[in-house]
Image (cartoon, rainbow, N blue to C red):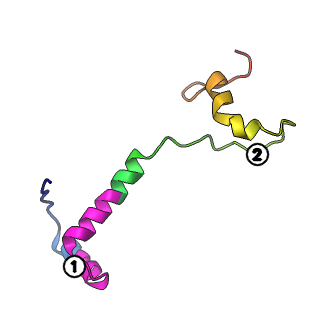
Amino acid sequence: MTTLAVPLTDDAFLALQQIAAKQKTTLEKLAEEALAHYLHAHTAAPRAYSFIGIGHSGQGDLSLKVEETLAKVADRREGWSLEK
């Protein structure tokens, strides 16, 4: 295990102490939990396409095959086209 020293303002340190006391935990556990949440948020799987499911294709299983279908025709940087 590695120890990390983090400089804090007096106000931030006092606020963290109050939160730790309210939650009946230590500053170390509070910081460890906060960093775990931060890491999870920044290492989560790539987001899915936000427009999935907004239209009607007439194909009942299209939403189940969305990743497979888009992998064939979509480029996350350039966009998509059904004419490939």
Name the residue type under label 1.
Gln
- Picture quarter with the C terminus: top right
Image coordinates of residue 54 in percent, x first then y, are 76, 45
Q: Which mark is residue 54?
A: 2
Q: Quadrant of residue 83?
A: top right
Measuring 68% from the left and 28% from the top, which residue is drawn there? 69
Asked if residue 61 is positioned above or below residue 14 in the image, the reply reads: above
Viewed as shown, does residue 52 lie left or right of 40? right
Q: Residues within 10 Å of mark 2 (few under 14, many from 20)?
A: few
Question: Mark 1 packing: few (<14 Cα in 10 Å), some, or many (20+)?
Answer: some
Q: Position of residue 74 (x, y in %)?
A: 63, 26
Residue occupying the point 70% across, 42% down = 52
Q: Position of residue 53 (x, y in %)?
A: 74, 45
Residue 61 in the figure: left or right of residue 52:
right
Q: Which residue in the rendered view is the most extreme toward the top?
A: 84
**Residue 77 falls in image quadrant:** top right
The answer to which image quadrant residue 3 occupies is: bottom left
- 16 within the magenta span: yes
Q: Which residues are magenta?
A: 15-36
Amino acid type, mark 2: Ile
Residue 39's disc number: none
Which quadrant of the figure contains the N terminus? bottom left
Question: Which secondary structure type mostly characterizes the magenta part of the structure?
Answer: helix
Q: Secondary structure at mark 1?
A: helix
Camera-nearest residue between 78 and 19: 19
Q: Is residue 56 left or right of residue 20?
A: right
* Residue 17: numbered disc: 1
Place of residue 8 in the rendered image (x, y in percent of width and height, measured from the top left) = 17, 66
At 17% from the left edge and 69% from the top edge, which residue is drawn?
Answer: 9
Q: Is residue 84 magenta?
A: no
Q: Earlier in the sequence, mark 2 or mark 1?
A: 1
Report the residue that reaches farthest toward the right. Answer: 58
